[in-house]
Amino acid sequence: MPEISNIIIWIILGGISGWIASKIMKKDSQMGVGMNILVGVVGAFIGGWLAGVFGWGPATGLNIWSFIVSIVGAVILLFIISLFKQKE
């Protein structure tokens, strides 16, 4: 079970990563704090998985590499979501 301090760090870094990704994808005006956190946290899982698949090394801990991987994963997530929204 993760410690409460780790969960708080996930939420803070997820929010920052999601916010940066939403700025990159020009979706910031459509997203609130909650969506930025959700996109950042889910993006961290996507980015971490992709880093492992491509052999770029693990994205673990509180460091710049994990932060970059999280942002890249969040951008990919927002791109995939935008593909589905365009079809509506």
Image (cartoon, rainbow, N blue to C red):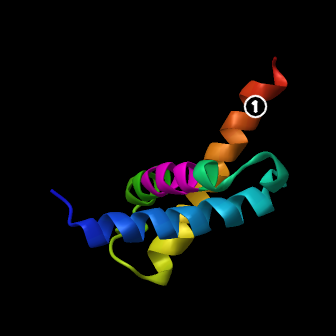
- Residue 54, given in percent of the width and then of the height, sits at 45, 57
- Residue 80, given in percent of the width and then of the height, sits at 67, 37
Q: Is residue 26 left or right of residue 49?
A: right
Viewer-nearest residue: 59 or 26: 26
Viewer-nearest residue: 87 or 29: 29
Residue 32 shown in magenta = no
Q: Which residue is mark 1?
A: 83
The residue range painted magenta reads 37-45
The quarter of the displayed image where residue 75 is located:
bottom right
Residue 71 seen in this snapshot = no
Count every numbered label the image shows and give the total: 1
Viewer-nearest residue: 47 or 85: 85
| In this view, 74 is above or below 65 | above
The residue drawn where x is 55% and y is 56% is 37
The quarter of the displayed image where residue 73 is located:
bottom right
The quarter in which the N terminus is drawn is bottom left
Q: Main secondary structure of the magenta part?
A: helix
- Residue 13, given in percent of the width and then of the height, sits at 50, 69
